[in-house]
Image (cartoon, rainbow, N blue to C red):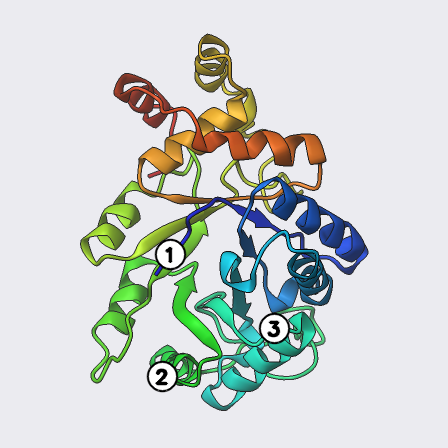
Amino acid sequence: MHLYENIALYTLNTKRTSLVAQRATKFAIEVGFRHIDCARVYQTEEQVGQAIRSKIADGTVKREDIFYTSKLWCTFLRPDLVQPALEKSLKDLQLDYVDLYLIHFPVSMKPGEELLPKDENGKIILDSVDLCRTWEALEKCKDAGLTKSIGVSNFNHKQLEKILNKPGLKYKPVCNQVECHPYLNQSKLLDFCKSRDIVLVAYSALGSQRIKGWVNQNHPVLLEDPVLCAIAKKNKQTPALVALRYQIQRGVVVLIKSFNKKRIKENIQVMMNSLPSDVISAIYSVTLCK
């Protein structure tokens, strides 16, 4: 399995950026990206699928060159809803299969048309689902050829162990996609995943999105970190490339979100230059949380 031969373009999750996501996906494929990470909840799969198919049609790539990841949203975790949810993504994408299908979050929400179902007080309405049964439904999707591999996202090690220790487990998760960057290096989770031969995939690899109500605005900005900036200057790289290369050398797959052509083209250069071990140690020292 050619899991994650390239770093990924990570598409944005609002309808307003659907056409932007389409253009960015096309450009990313043109400059060499081959792993496209998306999800039902981002509401861009139709446009991303169009971009992929257009690059197949013009001969830039073949379908087997693209590694496409989609995710099962929280309102579809009941076992009987899993395959229909994947089939909806495939219909939007106009693809026969995805390369990887993930449980997006280990939290089940009330099924229905609303992606974020809320009660009269504005609180999310949760549902009660055994994730082991959800996993069994994903295994059936793999057996049906709808996805090449299956995995999870935002799972801690105990939640991973619940799947791994499930009686009758047919396929274990190939990866766990979580927020991971130098300020949140996930070292313990990474060690656990490596011990179980599970790939750790990092989103927000250049730091958490600074959304009010989500991130304390007084917290430091990763790409302004003095250690990263000094290393970048010394190595004639950008702080972003240093942060991304750090992850790759730790054995972490990085997802990159950008719609800027200059940055998309720049980011793929991360595959070219290695960092010495003392630099990796220096970056490790800036972590705020392991």
Task: Determine the CA span between mark 1 and mark 2.
Answer: 24 Å
Q: Amino acid at mark 2?
A: Glu
Taking the view exactly as shown, the residue that stands out farthest to the bottom is 80
Determine which quarter of the picture holds residue 48. Answer: bottom right
Q: Amino acid at mark 3?
A: Leu
Residue at image coords 23%, 51%: 194
Image position of 186 (left or right of 128): left
Residue 250 position within the rendered picture, expressed as x and y whole percent measured from the top left: 31, 37
Determine which quarter of the picture holds residue 283. Answer: top left
Q: Amino acid at mark 1?
A: His
Task: Determine the CA span between mark 2 and mark 3.
Answer: 23 Å
Q: Residues within 10 Å of mark 3 (few under 14, many from 20)?
A: some
Determine which quarter of the picture holds residue 86. Answer: bottom right
Say which quadrant the N terminus sits in: bottom left
- Judging by the rendered image, the residue that carries numbered circle 1 is 2
- The vertical placement of 86 against 68, above or below, is below
Q: Residues within 10 Å of mark 1 (few under 14, many from 20)?
A: few
Say what secondary structure mark 1 lies in: loop
- Judging by the rendered image, the residue that carries numbered circle 2 is 136
Mark closest to the chain's N terminus, 1 or 3: 1
Residue 113 position within the rendered picture, expressed as x and y whole percent measured from the top left: 70, 81
